[in-house]
Amino acid sequence: EVQLMESGGDLIHPGGSLRLSCVVSGFPFNNHWMSWVRQSPGKGLEWVAKINEDGSEITYVESVRDRFTISRDNLQKSVFLQLTSLRVEDTAVYHCARLVGPEGSTVALFDSWGQGTLVTVSS
Amino acid sequence: QAVLTQPPSMSGAPGQRVTISCTGGRSNIGEGFDVHWYQQLPGTVPKVVIYGNKNRPSGVPDRFSGSKSDSSASLAITGLQTEDEGYYYCQSYDSRLRAYVFGGGTEVTVL
């Protein structure tokens, strides 16, 4: 059974930093792209970042570029998201998700999700 | 504001049909990028119900169907059931933003 479990969310002041972790099981982690997707009541779902199998290809949504850093440790079967210079609008539940390219499709999709970890940015 | 536009809410009686639209632009759906649809039931994480515009993953009832035309896509739910209540999101890719993009979500209520 595929499982993803996030941790690290917290209440943090604007400008602060936080590190989120996601440990996975039930599939060959080092064969898959991984991603972070956040969900907030006001903005719905928003893709944040993705990382390829060996960590050599990384992409971010523009709103977090230069503030967030995605990384992975294949031995620990974990993916991480370092959040810095946090803003109120970064408040959300952060999900890690497996990113797959379905056969015959031009766009990857998120086929497995963790329950998420809540990041609240407030003074 | 989401890149892909969905109606905020839709409703229908049990057994009826609801169709949720997802409108994009020339740099995403209109450029030929596929659309996927997710169902998020209360207290759960999103689950794929349609991928590649019209394909159903195994285990998803054939009451769910998808289509795409020009810069828009649609998810239809026929024979609406109470267990279909929840939020539905479309997702694609935007070449200008170089990002995966979602619709704002549609809350489906069964009357």
Image (spheres, coloured by chain):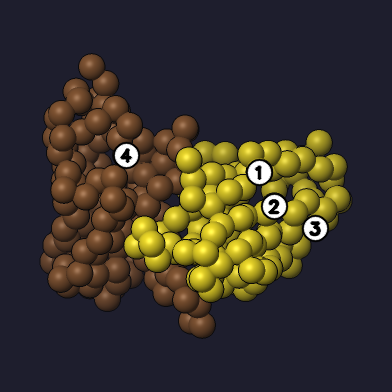
Q: Secondary structure at mark 2?
A: strand
Q: Quadrant of residue A11?
A: top left
Please tell me whether mark 4 or mark 1 is closer to you in this view: 1
Q: CA distance from mark 3 to mark 2?
A: 11 Å
- Picture coordinates of residue B83, whole percent (x, y): 70, 46
- Specify the subunit that label 3 lies on: B
Label 2 sits on residue: B20
Q: Which residue is mark 4?
A: A117
> Are the residues flagged by discs 1 and 2 in contact, CB closer than 8 Å?
yes
Residue A77 showing in the rendered view? no
Please give the label number shown on residue B78. Answer: 3
Q: CA distance from mark 1 to mark 3?
A: 18 Å
Q: Residues within 10 Å of mark 4 (few under 14, many from 20)?
A: many
Relative to residue B26, is residue A56 drawn left or right?
left
Numbered disc 4: secondary structure: strand
Q: Please tell me whether mark 1 sits on a helix, a strand or a loop.
A: loop
Which circle, 4 or 3, is nearer the viewer?
3
Q: Which kind of residue does numbered mark 1 sit on?
A: Pro
- Looking at the picture, which amino acid does disc 3 mark? Thr
Kindly indicate whether the residues beneath marks 4 and 3 are on one polypeptide chain. Answer: no
**Residue found 53% across the figure and 73% down from its top:** B32
> Mark on residue B7?
1
**Are the residues flagged by discs 3 and 2 from a single subunit?**
yes
Q: Return the chain for callout 4.
A: A
Question: x%, y% of residue B99?
Answer: 36, 59
